[in-house]
Image (cartoon, rainbow, N blue to C red):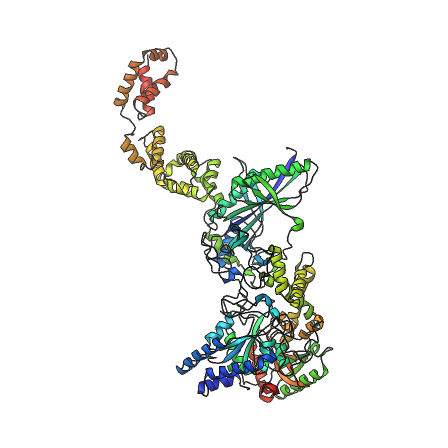
Amino acid sequence: MSEWESVIGLEIHAQLATRSKIFSGASTAFGAAPNTQACAVDLGLPGVLPVLNREAVTMAIRFGVAIDAEIDHHSVFARKNYFYPDLPKGYQISQYELPIVGKGHLYISPAEGELKEVGITRAHLEEDAGKSIHDQFPEQSAIDLNRAGTPLLEIVSEPDMRSAKEAVAYARKIHSLVRYLEICDGNMQEGSFRCDANVSVRRKGEQKLGTRAELKNINSFRFLERAINIEIERQIDLIEDGGSVVQETRLYDSERDETRSMRSKEEANDYRYFPDPDLLPVAITDEDIAHIRASLPELPEQKKQRYIDELGLSDYNAELLTANRETASYFETALAEIPEQNAQLANWILGDLAGALNKANLDIADSPITPQMLAQLISRISDDTISGKIAKEVFEAMWHGKGDADGIIEARGLKQITDSGAIESLIDAVIAANPEQVEQFRAGKDKVLGFFVGQVMKQSQGKANPGQVNAILREKLKP
Amino acid sequence: MTSSVTEIRRALAAGEFSSVEITQDYLARIAQHNPALNCFISVTDDIALAQARAADAALARGKAGALTGVPLAHKDLFCTDGVKTSCGSRILDNFIAPYDATVIENFRRDGAVMLGKTNMDEFAMGSSNENSWYGSVANPWNTAHVPGGSSGGSAAAVAAGLAPGATGTDTGGSIRQPAALCGVTGIKPTYGRVSRYGMIAYGSSLDQGGPFARSAEDCALLLQTMSGFDRRDSTSAEQAVPDYCGALGKGIEGLKIGLPKEYFAEGLDDSIATVIETAVAELRKLGAEIKDISLPNTSLSIPTYYVIAMAECSSNLSRFDGVRFGYRCDNPVDLEDLYKRSRGEGFGAEVKRRIMIGTYALSAGYYDAYYLKAQQLRRMIKQDFQQAFDSVDLILGPTTPETAFKLGAKTDDPVSMYLQDIYTISLNLAGLPGMSLPAGFIDGLPVGMQLIGNYFDEAVLLNAAHSYQQVSDWHLQTPEAFK
């Protein structure tokens, strides 16, 4: 296995979050009754003409600016010709030469401390096709053209990834970026964010690329990793058995956990691209680009750097907090309440909160604990109202909808005991009850102190201030 | 009946007859003559009469628009809401358009009455109207001859007085050539002047709608209604439309007219050359300055055109696949069979020929040699005109190399058919406006003279044509059988 190197490039289709379609005024909303969101233009009726939705161009440029890409002053739409029942015009309006977004790049962090640059060859605008439905009518296929004409940004990477893990890190990065930019909702289940992977293998040291297979039909990051790994294995096995990889499109079947051939290069269409005479070249001025650049939100890289430089967070925590827009926004909302406690806040978000969300399969935006609630909890630790241990209990209660931290502390009487008189009497009782351990400690067995602390905390139901307990115990146990 | 659009407007305004009356007259003429000419694919009597009644009501209220009550015919390539729009093809024989083309909408807005939809070469591919699923159209001047194409039905209908005006479309000469062959006046405007929305596409970068009528004055009226920016057509020009009728009557004193030597070279019928030279002499008498010019890349226009038009049509016609509308073959066994037989049975031979050639020209490995090369040549042809317009205001020549040929004479020789468009086709490649107007007769068949203008100079063209028509009566002639 180690003598092989895999080479992976991704083609990502991000559905742009425009209200209307790329070449018609029909709505792009998901889930409407079949063919209710397809107008004459989407149906490809005789005589209709496309009119470009300029918002889609703006969104594509937002992406281009964010990946530091070349953006040409003019861009051309081309027709990609092929026959398919859910492609109403018999061609898809796409881009071939002169895409909106040219060469760009971004950085991925496939593992802690690793940073890798990935090149982006281009990103172009195109219209989506409709949907063929094969399982609703016996012996007949149905077509729903609601999706036809939905704007897509196809983002093509260089073959820079060397493992499934890197490919997933890249896909996640793009996913995060398009959501930061508010140009795509990133919903993989609804197909708003789709990944195709070009996978080939070669012996290490080899310069020439191996023959690649294109994997399609991947609708989650987990499946992306899985599909690439089994495809890599398949190709290596094939070559080691004396065979050779053929250039083809393969479908990933998540139920059977396999990839299988969809069409080979020989059967591949000659798409006969040519500039669409119905659409004028898109003119993009430096002013347009500057305007869009100025309107960009703080991007993940910039945010991460700011968290490191200004908040003193670790590289790793900063990376995780900025990995998606919602997490960063949660962090920043809570931080506004407790500006001094950024390290504790980061730990709570990436630790207990992330764990709970993960377990419940919830997005951070849907967390039952709001940023304000978490901030309050953390301030109760820092002002010594509760201990860290009690805080976990309060967190649990908040998670289950029992109210905010102050309310729970009050209702359950969890306020920390800081009255030294009260603590002393607890300690006196514990010392009196355990003469044997007192002897041991006085004989030099320091470890026994932990036993006493534990006993006192237990007696206080965890509410005694652990620092005070420690100090008073040491004093009282002195021979 | 030789009524013109101008005359009908005047008479309607003066209350000499009603729109219903004149509409009924035309419908009666259509019923009488269409069996011999086959100009119409659909006659929309009910719609026509309803629109005529509405027009009369509007006239009575003093709310008349520019064309209120004027009956017109439309090429069956413009989508008309609720009316069959066949494009001359079997594949759309069952297609009832669910919307109006912008041009149709404009005529509705201005109050015009629709008599019916006219015959045409299938998908506007042809120069003789012999490629129609609905049969060929006869030339009113001699029914053994073709009317020209592809807008043959519209040209013949106007020539025979079955409509005072009609719409057409021109991709390589499809307005001007039938206008010439039928002895009527027709104008193809600058690309972008008239919206293409709702015009079933043949060659999208070349297609342009325009009117046929008996005179330049009538054409000015109809073009006024047809023209204007349309946000539904990205290639339509966002440019104000001048008052075309107001531009008439200014005379042509000092107008510089260029005669391209390539348009009078080998291939042109001598007697046509003589007719054109006579007309040029008339124009000189009116004060025009005549100059010899050259359009050196003229001979490249036919091959350039056929690569581009066929490439575009191969893609434009992909939507006719038997899936959503139009003809579908019986009992398809699978998807491929559905496609192959629906298209194989639905399209005629010329359409298939052009789709195949266009598909070939766009194929991997041939694209550079054909499509890209053709685009380069297209730029050169355009430059020829741009240079010429540095020194002249108008260019003049014959519209066609010969008069209307006999039905069937060229059906087995597509290349000879394609050469019919030698003088008209380069304008479409350059996007320039051009018009054809009657300039004489040879053996009882009309001869057309072509005027070519600079971009958006339709008013200059119409004024020059109108000036000529003030001193000539070729455009007033009517074929004996249709008087």
Q: Residue at the spot x=35%, y=36% of the render?
A: A400
Q: How many marks?
A: 0
From the viewer's perspective, is residue B22 above or below residue A321?
below
User: In x, y percent, where is residue A105?
Assistant: 56, 46
Picture quarter with the N terminus of chain B? bottom right
Note whether residue B178 is visible. Answer: yes
Residues B122 and A321: in front is: B122
From the viewer's perspective, is residue A203 above or below residue B239?
above
Picture quarter with the C terminus of chain B? bottom right
Q: Residue at the spot x=52%, y=45% of the render?
A: A174
Q: Residue at the spot x=66%, y=87% of the render?
A: B281
Q: Residue furthest right?
A: B266
From the viewer's perspective, is residue B226 above or below residue A248?
below
User: In x, y percent, where is residue A138?
Assistant: 53, 51
Q: Quadrant of residue B38?
A: bottom right
Note whether residue A159 is visible. Answer: no
- Give the side of residue A311 with respect to residue B444, left or right: left
Q: In which quarter of the image is residue B169?
A: bottom right
Residues B287 and A137: in front is: A137
User: In x, y percent, where is residue B118?
Assistant: 57, 75
From the viewer's perspective, is residue B182 above or below residue A84?
below
User: In x, y percent, where is residue B256?
Assistant: 62, 81
